[in-house]
Amino acid sequence: MEVKLWNDKREREMYENFAELYAIIKATEKLEKAYVRDIISSSEYETECQKLIAHFKTLASTLKDTVPSIERFADTYKMDCPAAINPTTSAAIVAECVQNFITAMDSLKLNMVAVDQVYPLLSDLSASLNKLGILPPDFEGKIKMREWISRLAKMGAADELTEQQARQLHFDLESSYNSFMAALPNAGT
C-alpha cells in the first residue's frame, strides 16, 4: 500500500521546504564544528557561511508562517545541532558580521562617504556584532562602531566624511575585523 506524505501541492511544497531547512541546519552544524576544530580555513568558512545565509534567507521568507522559530523546528524534528542553533556560536551570525564588515570597508573604498551611506552600514555591523554572544561587551569592534555611530548621528545626512575621517574609519573597521577573526577559533570551546 502506498503511503501519501501530503494531501495537496501546497502541503508537498511545505514538506520540501522543511527538508531544505533541515539540510541547512545540518550543514551549518557541520560547518561550525569543522571551523571550531580548525579543519577548514576562515576564508572557506566565510564562503560557505555566505552560501548558507543566502539559501536560508530565501527559504526563511517562504517558511515565516509555518516555522515560528528555528529552535522550535529543531526541537520538533529532534535535531541535535547545538552549534547551528545556539545563537552564541551561530555560523549565520558570524557570516552576517563578516558580510557587514566587508560591505562597510568596500563602500569606503568606493568613496561612499556621505553620512546617509555610511551610517546604515555601521548600524547593521554593530547590531550583528551585538548578536554574537562569544564577543565580550568591551570587544574593540563594538566600542569603535558605537563611537562612529554616535559621531555620525551628530552630522547631517548629506554631510560627508573628510578623507582623514574615512581613512580612520577604514582603519578602525580593518583592525576590528582582524580582532573579530582572531576571536572566532575559540568559539564554542
Image (cartoon, rainbow, N blue to C red):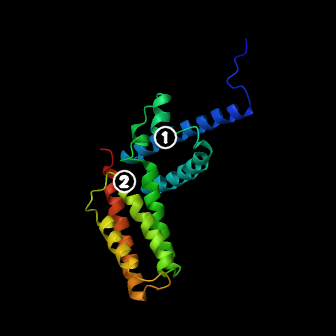
Residue 129, quarter of the rendered image = bottom left
Assess whether mark 2 and mark 1 are in contact (beta carbons under 8 angstroms). no
- Residue at left 69%, top 32%? 12
In the figure, 111 relative to 182: above or below? below
- Residue at left 38%, top 87%? 164
Find disc 1 in the rendering and name its residue: 69
Q: Position of residue 70 (x, y in %)?
A: 48, 40
Three-letter residue code for mark 1: Ser
In depth, the one of 100 and 65 nearer the eye is 65
Label ID, residue 52: none
Find disc 2 in the rendering and name its residue: 132
In depth, the one of 69 and 42 nearer the eye is 69
- Asked whether the viewer can see residue 6, the reply is yes
- Residue at left 39%, top 46%? 87
Residue 128, quarter of the rendered image = bottom left
In the figure, 35 relative to 129: above or below? above
Secondary structure at numbered mark 2: loop
Compare marks 1 and 2 and give the one earlier in the sequence.
Answer: 1
Relative placement, left or right, of 6 versus 127 is: right
Secondary structure at numbered mark 1: loop
In depth, the one of 45 and 150 nearer the eye is 150
Three-letter residue code for mark 2: Leu
Furthest toward the left, the residue is 138
Q: Position of residue 36 (x, y in %)?
A: 37, 46
- Residue at left 43%, top 36%? 81
